[in-house]
Image: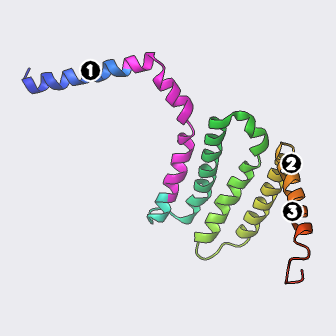
Amino acid sequence: MTNKNQQAIGIFIIIAGIVILLGKWGVFSFLGKAFWPLIILVPGILLHVLYFGRMAPAGVLVPGGMLTVYGVLFFICNTWGWSLMSYLWPTFILGVATGLYEYYEFEQPKPRGVMTASVLLGVISIILLGFTLLRTSIIYVIAVLLIAGGIWMIWNRGKSSRGW
């Protein structure tokens, strides 16, 4: 065995030992639990890269947009807790709306009905998201903003020169 081969095998054995040691310490388990949404996010981004690199048709933007939105949603829930899913579930509808909207914007000629479906799904998603957020403590923020806005309107009633 040559000196060069022996050195390469030695480096490989050291790396294997480090990998085994890190695995026993739970490093890979943590990385798998923390970064698994990349399995969904990366293909979504790659589909966008394929389209914008002119290697795929605009139809890949539908799953690309959906996977990207879902990957971000799963990162948020993975980071701040899966209990958020009870409020953020309308994002699944928003993912479909995003994919359809991207397809509509970049497909030539413009497909019929896709923009209508995209806007309809987007509006439904935003409305449902608003309803689910009203069940949380955000209602207190809205109440405080309404009170502050009313006080500001009363306070500046006579100070406006525009007359409205």
Q: Is residue 148 left or right of residue 34?
A: right
Q: Which residue is mark 2?
A: 139
Q: Secondary structure at mark 3?
A: helix
Q: Quadrant of the N terminus?
A: top left
On the image, the x and y values in percent for residue 135 come to: 87, 43
Side of 81 relative to 145 (left or right): left
Please count the marks in the image. 3
- Magenta stretch containing residue 119, yes or no? no
Span highlighted in magenta in the image:
20-48
Q: Residue 20, image x and y in percent?
A: 38, 18
Front residue of 27/125: it is 27
Nearest the eye: 113 or 45: 45
Q: Is residue 15 left or right of residue 23?
A: left
Dominant SS in magenta: helix
Badge 2 amino acid: Ile
Mark 1 = which residue? 14
Q: Is residue 13 above or below residue 134?
A: above
Q: Quadrant of residue 99?
A: bottom right
Residue at position x 48%, y 20% in the image: 26
Residue 123 place in picture, x, y as percent: 79, 61
State the separation of the CA atoms marked 2 and 1.
57 Å
Query: Who comes first in sequence, dot 2 or dot 1?
Result: 1
Residue 149 image label: 3
Colour pattern of the rendering = rainbow
Q: Which quadrant of the structure image shows residue 136?
A: top right
Cα separation between marks 2 and 3: 15 Å
Name the residue at the bottom extreme. Answer: 162
SS of the residue at dot 2? helix
Residue depicted at 62% across the width and 58% down the height: 62
Residue 26 shown left or right of residue 117 in the figure: left
Residue placed at 68% from the left, 34% from the top? Answer: 81
